Image (cartoon, rainbow, N blue to C red):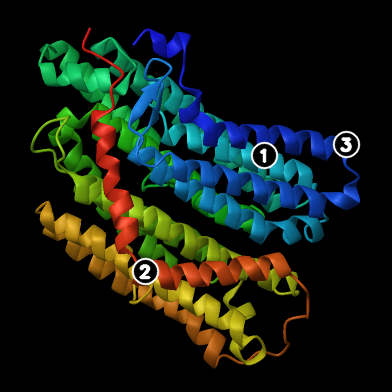
Amino acid sequence: MGQQLINPDWGLVVPQLIVFVLAMVLLFGDAFLPRERHYTWLTGISLGGYTIALIALVWQRGESDSTFYGLFRADGLTVFLSLTILAAAILTVLTSASYVDQLEGRMPLGEFYVLLAFSILGALLTSAAGDLILIFVGIELSSLSTYILTAFAKRRATSLEGALKYFLLGLFASAILLYGMAWIYGATGSTNITTIAQVLEAGVIDDNLNASLLLGLLLIVVGMGFKMAAVPFHFWTPDAYDGAPTPVTGFMSVVPKAAAFAATIRLLVQALAPLRDDWLTLIAILALITMTFGNIVAVSQRNVKRLLAYSSIAHTGYILVGIAAYQTDTGFTGGGGDQGISSVLYYLLAYTFMNIGAFAIVSWLQHRGKGMTLDDFNGLAAHEPLAAAAMAIFMISLMGIPPTIGFYAKYYVIVAAIDAELLWLALAIVLMSAVSAFYYLRIVAVMYFGDSETAPEPRRTRLLDLGIAGMVVGVLLLGLFSSPIIRLANEWSDALTVAGATVP
């Protein structure tokens, strides 16, 4: 194992290195390319870089190894989470290029792409982390970039206000998370997630250290609750989502959430799996409160961005059910719990397409002189039938109606909950999905049955249109052909057997 640091396996970190190089190229491109060429050149470079990283990631499928003393892991979990994050990156570039270049006073596109790349890099590092230190560094790299992106429309007070709330609460969450990690390190003597799990399984922890572990566990759950916007740690979400530029809102509703769930899986399911009985009830209750609060408050919203913010909170609750459904009957190195975590991974991918798609339609309307309220969707189908149809598909998918990907995402989570004998959580998902039908279908109703006094202004937004079309296809086809994705998600279990640490 000592050779891991002396001769690290750089082949395992190729996708992350590609994104890092992309960030550097964008940085120099922003500095030296003429401003009028930024839209064409930097957008093309961004799309090309993320696509190449995605191809490199596909070549990694089947790997199950670690490097840098177990700090970095290439396994099935890394591949699927990185796939989701890179897909979100490509969709964000497609939906944000014209917005950043044309609206909100023409924001600097080069700076936007650089910050986006570093946020993506942080999320990728988190998904591949095999150590508490890299988990924290990855989350903070992603978070710091996202804070700045939230305030990117700096001429608008709501953007600065939302970013400030997000930043301050994010700092508290980071401090709480780091403090929890410190307690875990103090009790086990290691920051490596494999070593932590093996120490806990060995049963060498006395009562005093066990109390320290439980405190660390609680602090980690609180810290990650802030990062993923779970109730009651969601206070920053509505204002940050409302104030941020709309494409940034779509991005931050997916990538930071994916990074937070990546860290949660690494910490709870891998490092602290032997303490499952201690965190299972906590996560289950958190899931119930989160989905209930998010859906109920969303009912009263007329601002579509705030409505989707509370919807995002509700979906956090649904995904948490998959974490609560994790089962470990055969110990840390066994294959238990595949269904619960696989459903989480599939849901994150599904959520990427349908939620970024919903915010893309809001951005599409803003390009055409409309705002973000329900009234701006009145009669949209009469003037722009394709845009209305796309928004209807995204709303139906978020609600969980077949044959969209949203239906299959909820189905797999519900099946996992039933299999784990959490029938009350499965019923809660069904009931809360029925509640969500009110506000999702209300948007569909005003588009098709409302009267509009003015039609949207004609504008050419080719990249945005392409992104929306791609997400509509993804929402429909990835649901109908979900079996290959589920098989890929099931490969996460090889993350439980990656070598790289031993009990000291």
Residue 63: name its quadrant. top left
Q: Nearer the viewer, residue 218 or 31?
A: 31
**Mark 1 vs 2: CB contact within 8 A:** no
Where residue 346 sits, quadrant-wise, is bottom left
First along the sequence among labels 2 and 3: 3
Where the C terminus falls, by quadrant?
top left
Left or right, residue 218 beside residue 178: left
Could you tell whether 8 is left or right of 153 in the image?
A: left
Check disc 1 and report its element: helix, strand or loop. Answer: helix
The numbered mark at residue 115 is 1
Where does the image place residue 329, in percent across and percent down from the top left? Answer: 8, 38
**Which of disc 1 and disc 3 is earlier in sequence?**
3
The CA distance from mark 2 to mark 3 is 44 Å
| Residue 433 position within the rendered picture, expressed as x and y whole percent measured from the top left | 31, 69
For the residues carrying marks 1 and 2, which lies nearer the camera in this image?
A: 2
Q: Is residue 298 left or right of residue 279?
A: right
Residue 180 image position (x, y, % from top left): 34, 23
The residues bearing labels 1 and 2 have C-alpha atoms spaced at a distance of: 32 Å
Quadrant housing the N terminus: top left
For the question of whether residue 37 can be seen, the reply is yes
Q: Residues within 10 Å of mark 2 (few under 14, many from 20)?
A: many
Type of residue at label 1?
Leu
Q: Are marks 2 and 3 in contact (CB under 8 Å)?
A: no
CA separation in Å, label 3 and label 1? 17 Å
Query: From what the image shows, is residue 484 above or below residue 460?
Result: above
Tell which of 56 and 193 is nearer to you.
56
According to the image, label 3 marks what residue? 32
Location of mark 2 (residue): 479
